[in-house]
Amino acid sequence: MNEVLSTKNGASASFSTEEILIDLSSIGSFENILFELTNIIEQSNLRGKNVKINFGDLSLTQNMVSSLQSVLKGFDISIKMIFSSSIETKIAAMEVGLTVSGEKPEIKQQTAASDSIIETQKDEDKLVDAMNNVLAGSHEIVKENTLFIKQNLRSGQKLEHDGNIVIIGDCKAGSEIIATGDITIWGILGGIAHAGSKGDYKAKIRAFRINAIQLRIADLLARKPDAIEMEKMDKHNLFTPEEAKITNGEIVIYTEY
């Protein structure tokens, strides 16, 4: 059974044998967030621990998230994951190297660390135009609730988002991407990719070259049979974009010309 510590203002911390989840989603202002976080730390033995924090739909800036990190580091506490439904908070957290998720937090959820860098809102049109030029023929990328990242995703990194994900870079073997919408990679896709994770059978996965160990769209699963070592190849000269989508009940990879 999990132990729960609650404050009179609505903050809480859930403890299990494996994880600690701090819920600050009902706290209104940043000053109160700092107060309640400090209150929880003082009432529990969190020194030297890794914690997950749920902010719900609260919007935090990069400076706010950095301040929270500094407070926790002063107690020798590390942030393992941030849960948030706010795009602003997700971007702020990932800009300072934190793993983020839009999913509802669960005390036993396991997630690898990530340090992706997010492009700012003013660059969205440029990134979408670039992706549309490279991946000609794909349906329009919806900008609403789309997460834009300009960085390679390394082995062991996991990225989750409630919406579409667009990555300018390669996703190495051992990485994992989960999106409720489409996944678009301006580079080579290795590792695991799961589009339409909440049951969207119309979701698609696109990349310069799909070399993923596992592809999933909604509840369907497929493997890429001809895995090769991409780092030894020049993707700009050899590859044309590929798109994976569901056709006749199966995941099929198409080459876009």
Image: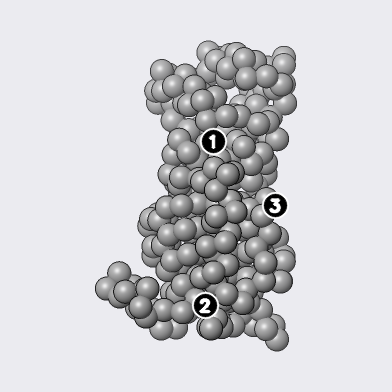
| In the rendered image, the vertical position of residue 220 relative to residue 93, given as above or below | below
Residue 8 picture location, percent across and down: 72, 14
Residue 36 image point, x, y percent: 62, 17
Labelled pair 3, 2 in contact (Cβ < 8 Å): no
The residue that label 3 is drawn on is 144
Residue 242: which disc? 2
Callout 2, which amino acid? Glu
Q: Disc 1 marks which residue?
A: 92
Query: What SS does tag 2 mark?
Result: strand
* Mark toward the start of the polypeptide (1 vs 3): 1
Q: Is residue 110 left or right of residue 227?
A: right
- Name the outermost residue toward the bottom: 248
Q: What residue sits 43% from the left and 44% below the top?
A: 115
In the rendered structure, find residue 61 and report the number of the disc placed on it: none
Q: Residue at x 46, y 45 (%)?
A: 117
Q: Amino acid at mark 3?
A: Glu
Q: Earlier in the sequence, mark 3 or mark 2?
A: 3
Q: Quadrant of residue 140?
A: bottom right
Of marks 1 and 3, the one in the foreground: 3
